[in-house]
Amino acid sequence: MAPLRSRGVQLVLRVLLGGFFVYASVDKILDPAAFARVVYQWQVVGPLYSNLVAVTLPWVELLAGALLVLGVWKRESALVIALLLSVFLGAAASVLARGIDVENCGCTSLARSEATAPGWPPSWARGVGWFLVSRDLLMLGAAALLASTDDRRRAAAERHAATPAV
């Protein structure tokens, strides 16, 4: 577990996870009406809350992702991302359990599959399914690892270890 706590691994995880959330927010911010339709398609909340989610969620994703990439409020932004991923996973579980066919999960792009390159993304990576659940669980693990790392405690331990005994 010690290698996962190294500064280099932490930096890579921060940039990849935060970058994913920044990237995922752009389409949603640019077209909140299309994102509201995607949220409503999940049938987890009604139209009013779908609109509210469509207007606020992308900005939370952008802010948390940017802060994580920049290394500002790392633990807090990782906790926000972990909370978002937990909610996404719960909603995905609900969609899967109810057998709702969601063509586009709206996670990173609002483009309909017919409008993108033929065969891309592959069918197993579209919509709400096990690929989405696996990817979100992996990201949740990374967010939990980042949130559980306390740089202040690590820095104090390093200072203590570097201090010669008197």
Image (spheres, rainbow, N blue to C red):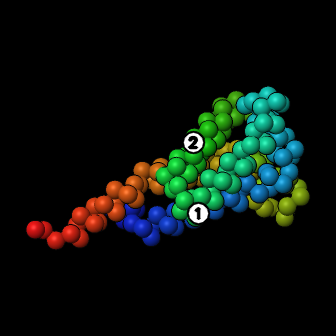
Q: Is residue 6 left or right of residue 15?
A: left
**Residue type for callout 2:** Leu
Badge 1 is on which residue?
Answer: 69
Q: Is residue 107 left or right of residue 113?
A: left
Mark nearest the camera among 1 and 2 is: 1
| Disc 1 packing (10 Å; few <14; some 14–19; many ≥20) | many
Return the residue nearer the eye: 20 or 153. Answer: 153
Badge 2 is on which residue?
Answer: 83
Q: State which quarter of the image contains the C terminus.
A: bottom left
Question: Is residue 89 visible from the viewing direction of this image?
Answer: no
Q: Position of residue 114 (x, y in %)?
A: 88, 55
Q: Earlier in the sequence, mark 1 or mark 2?
A: 1
Q: Is residue 150 left or right of residue 128?
A: left
Q: Is residue 144 above or below residue 19?
A: above
Residue extending farthest to the left is: 166
Q: Is residue 24 above or below residue 7?
A: above
**Residue type for callout 1:** Val
**Residue positioned 62% across, 53% down in the render:** 64
